[in-house]
Image (spheres, helix red, strand yellow):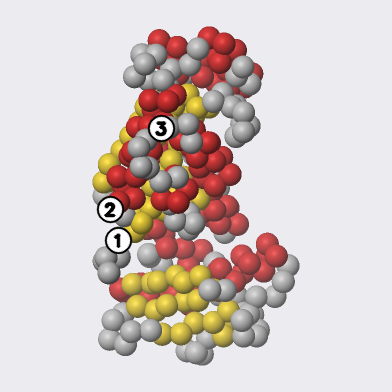
Amino acid sequence: MSPEKPDALLWMDVETTGLDTNRCSILEIGLRCTSMDATREHARLEAIIHISRETMLTAQLPALDLHLNNGLLAQCETSDPVHCSPEAIAREATRFIGDMAGMYTLHPAGTNIQHFDLPMILRFCAKARVFDSSPIDSLLSYRALDVTTLRLTAKTLGQDPYTYRAKPTHRVHDCLNRDIAEYRHYLTLMATPALATKVAPYELHGTNLHTRPTRTGARERLFELEGVSILHFGQYSDTANRNLRAVAKTMYETSGEPTIVEDDDE
């Protein structure tokens, strides 16, 4: 029996000729494999894809304007038509994902990852002819990380993650840097009392959201929320109850349904 592979995040970003995942073309692709806390980068692939003038003219007007201004269309048109062809880059991306999947359990990560970037990449890589390669979707975990979820959670808790952003360049290198930086920021909030102190304890009644301690001696607690586990380590485990109530409050405000907290410590 082979040992279990460690988990890793496969960050994805594409720049395209529009928003239709079934028809639009990829102009630039970025893939970056990191540790689950995104503090270590294992490998990356960033590539511009050659497109013809005819393909360029099929771009939706907002995308055409955007990528004319950021210089991407000019780079695509002047790139090597052989080495940067869609087929060549699709083969490169397929090999990259296959190599990473051989070492790690890959969790797709990014912004709006499952509704845009991942479907675009799956369709794009389907044209690759790589000998003995598995379909890309079979190499990826169904558990994905969408940074948009974290941004919406922050917004629900009274923050505005969109206010102080630099103007996006809509280039894959910058977009991946932004997503990873924001993700690490949210991890910092979750690992300290900062998030919990933003929200007053929210008292609810009932029994379907509960906490229970796991390892005795190790300062950690496991919180189960409808089958989803959140692990709090180290000195910050004392704030976990307040974090849990913050989650319960958010669930109540967004669903309108009473969310139930059962606290063994009170």
In the image, which disc is placed on residue 5?
1
Left or right: 234, with 261 as reference point: left
Kind of residue at disc 3:
Arg
The picture places residue 153, in percent across and down from the top left corner, at 56, 57
Q: In which quarter of the view is residue 209 placed?
A: bottom right
Residue pictured at 48% horizontal, 68% vertical: 196
Q: Quadrant of the N terminus?
A: bottom left
Q: In the depicted view, which residue is nearer to us: 61 or 221?
A: 61
- Element type at mark 3: loop
The picture places residue 160, in percent across and down from the top left corner, at 55, 48
Mark sitting earlier along the chain (3/1): 1
Mark sitting earlier along the chain (2/3): 2
Mark 2 touches mark 3? (CB < 8 Å): no
The picture places residue 82, in percent across and down from the top left corner, at 36, 16
Residue pictured at 42% horizontal, 77% vertical: 222
Kind of residue at disc 2:
Met
- Element type at mark 1: loop
Residue receiving disc 3: 129
Mark 2 touches mark 1? (CB < 8 Å): yes
- Element type at mark 2: helix
Q: Is residue 83 above or below residue 197?
A: above
Q: CA distance from mark 2 to mark 1?
A: 6 Å
Residue receiving disc 2: 103
Residue pictured at 50% horizontal, 12% vertical: 52
Q: Is residue 16 above or below residue 125?
A: above
Kind of residue at disc 1:
Lys
Mark sitting earlier along the chain (2/1): 1
Q: Residues within 10 Å of mark 1 (few under 14, many from 20)?
A: few
